Amino acid sequence: RTSRVLKRGMAGIASRAPMGLLRRVPALAAARSIFAAAAAKRPVHDAVPSRGMAYIKGAKRNSTEAKMEEKKEEKKKQDVPLGMLKADGSSKRFYKSAGVTESEQNCPRTGALQKAWVLTLDDRGVRTPSNKQMVLPCKNLAMAIALEFDVQDLNILPYTMPLTTLATTAIDQLSRAEVRKSAVTTMVKQLSTDLITLRSTEPDDLVEKEQSLWGPICAWASANYGCEVVTSSEWLSMEQNPLLLKAVAADLESRSDWTIAAIDQVAGATGSTLLSLAVFHGVVAGPGALAAARAVEQYQIDRWGKVEACGMGGHDIDEADMRSRIAAALLFHRLLPQSHI
């Protein structure tokens, strides 16, 4: 009778015990299996799992967890792809700090092995949108780009990182022969509609202002390239001397991909290849380039007033955008080592 009572008690406990408790108390699990087997009229020994099987299951579980941890560690060591960042600034900051580590790279001109610096985010390498490693030619430029990443707040805003944009352009785009050739060809073609060669005929004060700002640059270009720069008020019928085009193309082709990226940015922002070349030859400083590029627009502002920022933009936004593009390109070029000029 005592045995029957004990059996009934164990059966009741085992049937009502939660699975978590059964896993922690082997006796309860065994009891539940025995009574379930009895109800199904199966041999009891088939219902009770052996201690060895429990160890095997535990080993498998531990092995799976270990593999998952290994995958997590490997993912942490992988490079960070910049291609995942959204241009609209909606990407969240996912790193704690940015830094640089020293590396080695072949010189683009001599092929000799030289020092280089790799951008890192939380000690992980960074890859450009084209999946190339973000390797910078000098420490100062690498630190400046790391600072652009470090000052980002909750979201990463790519449009506040001009040095990073120039570096990825040089690494991803201008390193390709066809893209580099296209960039040079576009800047040479721009000479036929270059901003500083298109002159006003009236009013007199505007004509004088253009001559005072643009005349010295055209005179420098004529002397530097050994061919006179043609200026005209009829831009549809204006053509530059082929010798000038050839000389400018040779000047651009002699520059590194990194310098081409900076020259192209200023030429695109100002609408003048000659003005951009004058800036990177040291003939015109940044503020002078901004004043020359905005000569006509500033004349209109002085005469009719400034349109402030609104939904469709404004004079102040245009000026700020051009200033930042010129300043970023000049800083980028200044930080480059001589081997990458």
Image: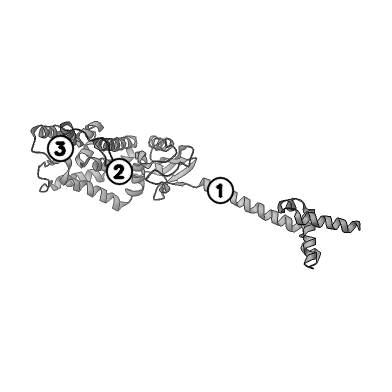
Q: Evaluate if marks 1 and 3 touch, with contact meaning CB atoms under 8 Å apart.
A: no
Give the residue type at disc 1.
Lys
Q: In x, y percent, where is residue 310?
A: 27, 38
The secondary element bearing badge 2 is classed as: helix
Residue highlighted by disc 3: 218
Q: How is the image coloured?
A: one colour
Q: Is residue 164 above or below residue 30?
A: above
Q: In x, y percent, where is residue 69?
A: 59, 48
Q: Quadrant of the N terminus?
A: bottom right
Which one is in front in this view, the residue at disc 1 or the one at disc 3? 1
- Disc nearer the start of the sequence (3/2): 3
For the point 70% across and 56% down, which residue is it? 57
For the point 41% across and 44% down, which residue is it? 90
Disc marking residue 72: 1
On the question of residue 83 being in view, the answer is yes
- The CA span between labels 1 and 2 is 38 Å
For the point 16% across and 33% down, which residue is it? 304
Tell me if 288 is positioned left or right of 126 in this view: left
Give the residue type at disc 2.
Ala
- Disc nearer the start of the sequence (1/2): 1
Residue highlighted by disc 2: 261
